Amino acid sequence: MRSTPWILLLLTTAVFAQPPQTREIVRITDDLYRARAGNWYTIFLVTDAGIILADPISTEFSQWLAGEIDRRFDVPVRYVIYSHSHFDHARGGAVFADTATFIGHENMLRNMDGRYPQMPGDMIDRDHNGVIDWDDIMVPTQAHPGICGWGPSFFDIFDRDGDARVSPQELFAEVRKPDVVFADHMQITLGDKTVWLAHPGRNHSDDATVILFPEERVLFATEFLADALVTDNIRALPSACGPFDGTPLQEWIASYRFVEALDFDRIAPGHGDMFDKAYVTETRVYFERLTAAVSAGMARGESLQSLRDNLQLTGYEGWANYERLRGNNIEAAYYNLSQR
């Protein structure tokens, strides 16, 4: 492990220190509920034959949630549906393994086959040595504190053998593999309820699933519609780590269009408050305008520094994190477009 100046280590540790998480269950409508672990959310549908649950989030949270479900509803969890394979949403499913079938997009199995998947927050295997080590976490953490990376506590959580490196096996130790996978879409019927699952394409991850509750007219989706920086304002610039998680911007835009074509009214995201479907269009338009503006600047031969200095992203000054992330978004788009 490389040494880090003590003051920087203190700062990054403070940024990623986890306060006590607020845990609660809130009824959305009828038999549909939203469960919270800090700013991480899941969703579940109660039927007389059991419960359909989305992300388990973590082992500790799942243990709490299992107790609450047993106390309040007295029916078992029959399905666990993963929104994607990232460790901050997918851990803890084993808590429900005695009664549940686990479902995810088919790319989840490939992402859990011993290699690293498309990781969040620009936490990637930079030196291609097959493990996540100090620089893989601290480079993005120090470059964009509180936005990308994680911080030293990543190793406290995932470095199970204490060698200052995290293998794929350690990273996924608490993620139960899906029993059933799908390619494009599938339906689940439990009791008198039907739920629709779909793969919107590549964006923050390459194994995303959105969950549509048609009777309730609610969609559950994580990250690409609202990332972990979003709390009470869905109009927010994205974190844009890595750059835009290495997925071409046109594929992000296609994912938004996919969601726009679905029939629902409200979104229950994996982070932040619920919001109306209309905001999906607003965010898609932001991505389109960012892509067009940066592409035009590159075509004129403008340097990255010139674009960061001069491109103001007019019309988005009132969005959350505008001052903090305007330059990051321009830089991420520049590198994303350069690579494509």
Image (spheres, rainbow, N blue to C red):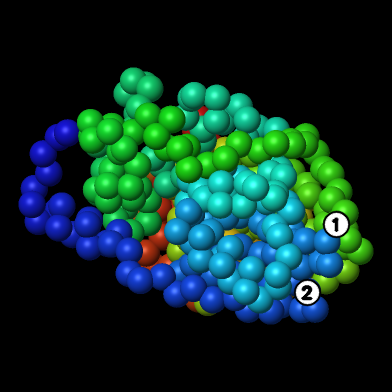
Give the residue type at disc 2.
Answer: Asp
Query: Does dot 2 land on a helix, a strand or a loop?
Result: loop
Image vertical order of residue 115 relative to residue 98, above or below: above
Task: Look at the image and tell me in which quarter the N terminus lies.
Answer: top left
- How crowded pointer 1 is (Cα within 10 Å; few <14, some 14-19, many 20+) is rated as some
Report whether residue 44 is seen.
yes
Image vertical order of residue 281 relative to residue 164, above or below: below
Query: Looking at the picture, how far across and down is residue 130, in whole percent?
Result: 38, 22
Q: Where does label 2 land, which residue? A: 31
Q: Where does label 1 land, which residue? A: 190
Residue 195: quadrant of the picture: bottom right
Image vertical order of residue 314 relative to residue 233, above or below: above
Residues 230 and 14: in front is: 14
Along the horizontal axis of the image, is 310 left or right of 151? right
Disc marking residue 88: none
Report whether residue 140 is seen.
no
How far apart, in angstroms, are the residues tagged by discs 1 and 2? 13 Å
Closer to the chain start, of discs 1 and 2, is 2
- How crowded pointer 2 is (Cα within 10 Å; few <14, some 14-19, many 20+) is rated as few
Query: Looking at the picture, how far across and down is residue 141, in whole percent?
Result: 29, 49
Residues 28 and 221: in front is: 28
Picture residue at 84% right of the left edge, 67% below the top: 48
| Residue positioned most to the left | 6
Query: Does dot 1 land on a helix, a strand or a loop?
Result: strand
Query: Looking at the picture, how far across and down is residue 204, in whole percent?
Result: 56, 46
Give the residue type at disc 1.
Answer: Leu
Along the horizontal axis of the image, is 95 left or right of 278? left
Picture residue at 66% right of the left edge, 38% below the top: 178
Picture residue at 11% right of the left edge, 39% below the top: 3
Task: Look at the image and tell me in which quarter the C terminus lies.
Answer: top right
